[in-house]
Image (cartoon, rainbow, N blue to C red):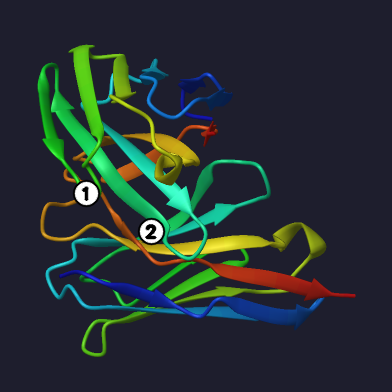
Amino acid sequence: GEDVEQSLFLSVREGDSSVINCTYTDSSSTYLYWYKQEPGAGLQLLTYIFSNMDMKQDQRLTVLLNKKDKHLSLRIADTQTGDSAIYFCAESGSGGGADGLTFGKGTHLIIQP
Amino acid sequence: DAGITQSPRHKVTETGTPVTLRCHQTENHRYMYWYRQDPGHGLRLIHYSYGVKDTDKGEVSDGYSVSRSKTEDFLLTLESATSSQTSVYFCAIGDRLNTEAFFGQGTRLTVV
């Protein structure tokens, strides 16, 4: 079945760049997403990338997609304390998201002062 | 923020009782979803709806039922709550054209 894998923790220093990685197995994925979850809150859509793109940039966020290796990454430039959260990678599958998304288990981003 | 409201936000119930969680949207999105979030599992899809009275099962549907009698409301029912259904439940909405899913704030359910 479909599977999305992420490392559980990432620790970075404030001001450095954070790179969160994700691998997926469904080669028919249409869209790939990054969500952010702060403590006690729902998931906030950060950005998404269509499967025929290899890069998308949005202010401090850069998404890279290597479709051949089924590898997705999220780079956060100039990491701030407000970036401390759990980041989820998700893919939409061949249904385009109409039948739900498959999520990774989430990466806890820890910011060191 | 997308207009999604979940109710209740917190609930404690006893094993064996029925429980209904409500998701209400004001975005007129066609697709609605119920996920549960558990430590070590991430988010898993319970049921989803692709229109009024059109629903289908997700990955972890056993013990749950859903109903959608109008576009804006999607109800999740635990027929007879068990301790394994203690979780945080999230509703999400989406429009296939945009393929984005917006999430509600979640309902924390504890079954004792």
Answer with left or right where residue A29 lies relative to residue B6: left
Tell me what residue is drawn at x 67 percent, y 74 percent: A77
Classify residue A52 by image quadrant.
bottom left
Please tell me whether mark 1 sits on a helix, a strand or a loop: loop
Given residues A65 and A12, the one toward you in this image is: A12
**Residue at the (21%, 42%) spot, across then down:** B62
The total of numbered circles placed on residues is 2
Q: Is residue B39 visible?
A: yes
Q: Which subunit holds the residue at mark 1?
A: A
In the image, B87 versus B15, the foreground residue is B15
Q: Position of residue A11 (x, y in %)?
A: 71, 80
Tag shown at residue B99: none
Q: Which of the chains bears the disc numbered 2?
A: A
Q: Residue at x 22, y 42 (%)?
A: B61
Residue at image mark 1 = A97
- Of residue A17 and residue B62, the one placed in the foreground of this image is B62
Name the residue at 26% across, 83% down: A70
In the foreground, B35 or A88: B35
Q: Amino acid at mark 1?
A: Gly
Residue A16 in view in this figure: no
Residue underneath mark 2: A48
Of mark 2 and mark 1, the one earlier in the sequence is 2
User: Taking B30 as reference, is A107 left or right?
Assistant: right
Whole-percent x, y for residue B96 in the image: 19, 40
User: Mark 2 or mark 1: which is in front?
Assistant: 1
- x%, y% of residue B33? 29, 35
Residue A41: x and y, percent?
62, 41
Amino acid at the residue labelled 2: Tyr
Disc 2, SS: strand
- Side (left or right) of B60 relative to A74: left
